[in-house]
Structure formats: structure tokens, C-alpha cells
């Protein structure tokens, strides 16, 4: 018989009692750190969201969660070892399991107020991040469960915003999978991967316990011709050979509209110029627009232009490779 399924018989020979030590695969002399480590490993391995439709994994997850409720803290463990802990009623146990295993990660909607959802996990999450996403408030759950309920599940949503919205800030109304609408204020200058927290907007709690929290992870849509670098925005502008040689003013697109950029004489491709205060953010903390110059010769120069340039090329010849 495996440790996960091993149970102890009641002294009176009745139905078997649940053995949390066996369920977690640890000895009765295990330290609290060893118990926590064993629970984390089992809960991650057997979480139903990672094993859809697997009844055996579901049961092992239930057993691990129940076991951690009983011996996951020093106080709870002491009560259990003294025989003072009462078993959870089966109905409550099942209901608590449903609350724990609720969905916690979605891709949110596209469009004015929503419509596209997929259910998945982040591929690049580390073990610690994944565990926190699944069981972020798990340590408090056992304590609160004994106080009369289970806290609601924290939920993580992924929201895709326009490049300008992330750079300059915006307000949007999104629709959650349960149909609830939520007004979201996107801070100016927010970066890819940052999360917004909405207290008490997650899954409903059970009994007297509070609801979980809602987190929105920001994904920024790319914008052709622009690139974020912290609070600075990078772009490129083409200039003619003549503008590069003698200088001049050229129009440059920014997120706020078009501005005129003064190009100094003798500019080369790759030269970067700064337009102050036209980057991401707001107020005095707003970043800059970094403009890279690209010298472009005419694709099909006319014979007249070539003939006109020959004497100049001979008179003012230079070696750009030196």
C-alpha cells in the first residue's frame, strides 16, 4: 500500500481515519519545513488544472490539501497529534476542494468590451511563481477554514492593451468570464508583464471567508515603427542625402502627433536624437522619444542628378570608411 493512500484504523475498528502524514508521504517526526515541502510538491504535481480529467490526481490533490489543513502549521499539527482535531465533514471538504481548484489564469478579451478567452498557464513561470499563482493564499486557508470558511480563489487574468494605452495611460471596461464588468485604469508607463491587483474581486469565498483577489497581467500590443525601452520610446526616421549633408527640419511621428526634428549638418545613419518628454509615462516622469536617423539615397536617381553630383563628388571627395 502506498503512503498516499495509507490510512489508520479507528480504535473501535470502525471506518478508517485520515492520516495526513501518510497522505503527504512524511514521517511523524518530519519538520514543518519538510511537511510544507512535501505538500508543495504534491499539490503542484496533482493540481486538477494541470491534470484535467484525471480522477486519481484529483483525489491525491484533495488528500494533500486536507492533510496540510491538519498538520500544515505547528498549532494545527499539535492539535491533531493530541487528538483534538475534528475531521472536516465530507460535504464541506468537497466544497472546499471546488473552491481551491477554480480557474486562476485566463487570457482576456479583445475588442471594445471583450470576447476572447483561453484557459492556460504561463509557460515561462518558474516553480515558485507557478505555486504562488496556484496557492498564493494557501497558508492562510487552513487557518481560516477552521474559523468558518475558505477564502475565495485568487484569479489571474491577462489583458492586452494598445501600445499607446500602456505608454500614456487609459481607462477600459473589461468583461470577466463570469459576465461581471470591471473598470480598469491603466497607469501611464506601465510595462509588459506588470500586474494590477483588485482586492476582493476574485473568486467567492465559502462561509464567512472573504473573496479572493483579482490580478490583471499586462500584455502590450506592438506598434509598427515604435519600440519601448523602459519609459523611453524608440523610432526611426528616414532623411535624404541632402538633409544629412546640409541639415534641416524633418517631420517625426510621436504618440502625441507629429513634431519637427532639427537634423544637424553632417548627420549619418544610426545617429540618435532625443525628443524630450515624448516617451512613456506622465508629467515630469515621462520618458523621451529616441529617434534614429536613416540616410536614404534615391532609388532611381535621374541622369541629370548624377551628372550634377559628379563634379561635387570629385571636388569634395572623402572616404566614409576611415
Image (spheres, grey):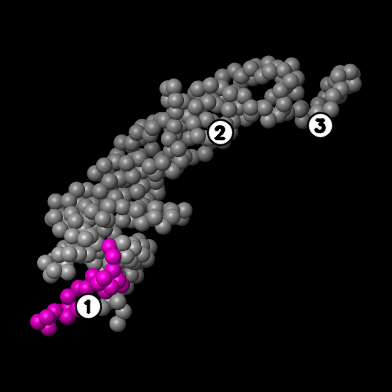
> Which numbered disc, 2 or 3, marks the residue that appears first in the sequence?
2
| The one of 123 and 117 positioned closer to us in this rendering | 123
Residue depicted at 84% across the width and 24% down the height: 318
Judged from the image, the secondary structure of the residue bearing numbered disc 2 is: loop
Distance of mark 3 from mark 1, alpha carbons? 81 Å
Q: Identify the residue under disc 3.
A: 321
> Looking at the rendered structure, which numbered label has been put on residue 7?
1
Residue depicted at 22% across the width and 55% down the height: 141
Graded by Cα atoms within 10 Å as few (under 14), some (14 to 19) or many (20 or more), the crowding at tag 1 reads some
Residue depicted at 19% across the width and 78% down the height: 8
> Which numbered disc, 3 or 1, marks the residue that appears first in the sequence?
1
Residue 78 screen position, x and y as percent? 17, 64
Question: Does the CB distance between marks 2 and 1 fall below 8 Å?
Answer: no
Distance of mark 2 from mark 1, alpha carbons? 62 Å
Query: Which contiguous range is marked in magenta?
Result: 7-32
Question: Does the CB distance between marks 2 and 3 fall below 8 Å?
Answer: no
Position of 265 with respect to 278 (left or right) is right
Distance of mark 2 from mark 3, alpha carbons? 30 Å
On the question of residue 320 being in view, the answer is yes
- Counting labels gives 3
Q: Is residue 103 above or below residue 174?
A: below
Q: Which part of the image, by quadrant, shows the N terminus?
A: bottom left
| Location of residue 225 (image quadrant) | top right
Residue 217 screen position, x and y as percent? 39, 44
Q: Identify the residue under disc 2.
A: 226
Amino acid at each position: 500500500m502506498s503512503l498516499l493512500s495509507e490510512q489508520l484504523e479507528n480504535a473501535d475498528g470502525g471506518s478508517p481515519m485520515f492520516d495526513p502524514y501518510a497522505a503527504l508521504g512524511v514521517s511523524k517526526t518530519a519538520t514543518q519545513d519538510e511537511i510544507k515541502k512535501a505538500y508543495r510538491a504534491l499539490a503542484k504535481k496533482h493540481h486538477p488544472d494541470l491534470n484535467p480529467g484525471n480522477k486519481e490526481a484529483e483525489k491525491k490533490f484533495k488528500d494533500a490539501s486536507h492533510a496540510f489543513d491538519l498538520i500544515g502549521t505547528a498549532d494545527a499539527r499539535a492539535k491533531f497529534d493530541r487528538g483534538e482535531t475534528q475531521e472536516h465533514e465530507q460535504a464541506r471538504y468537497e466544497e472546499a476542494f471546488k473552491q481551491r481548484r477554480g480557474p486562476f489564469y485566463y487570457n482576456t478579451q479583445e475588442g471594445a468590451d471583450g470576447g476572447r478567452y483561453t484557459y492556460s498557464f504561463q509557460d515561462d513561470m518558474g516553480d515558485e511563481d507557478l505555486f504562488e499563482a496556484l496557492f498564493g493564499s494557501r497558508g492562510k486557508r487552513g487557518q481560516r477554514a477552521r474559523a468558518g470558511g475558505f477564502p475565495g480563489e485568487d484569479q489571474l487574468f491577462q489583458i492586452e492593451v494598445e501600445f499607446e494605452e500602456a505608454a500614456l495611460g487609459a481607462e477600459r471596461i473589461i468583461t470577466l468570464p463570469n459576465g461581471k464588468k470591471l473598470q480598469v485604469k491603466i497607469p501611464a508607463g506601465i510595462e509588459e508583464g506588470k500586474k494590477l491587483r483588485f482586492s476582493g474581486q476574485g473568486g467567492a469565498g465559502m462561509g464567512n471567508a472573504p473573496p479572493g483577489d483579482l490580478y490583471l497581467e499586462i500584455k502590450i500590443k506592438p506598434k509598427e515603427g515604435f519600440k519601448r525601452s523602459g519609459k523611453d520610446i524608440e523610432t526611426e526616421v528616414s532623411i535624404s542625402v541632402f538633409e544629412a549633408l546640409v541639415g534641416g527640419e524633418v517631420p517625426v511621428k510621436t504618440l502625441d502627433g507629429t513634431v519637427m526634428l532639427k537634423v544637424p549638418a553632417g548627420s549619418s545613419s544610426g545617429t540618435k536624437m532625443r525628443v524630450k518628454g515624448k516617451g512613456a509615462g506622465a508629467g515630469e516622469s515621462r520618458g523621451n522619444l529616441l529617434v534614429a536617423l536613416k540616410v536614404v539615397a534615391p532609388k532611381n536617381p535621374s541622369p541629370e542628378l548624377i551628372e550634377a553630383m559628379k563634379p561635387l563628388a570629385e571636388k569634395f571627395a572623402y572616404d566614409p570608411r576611415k
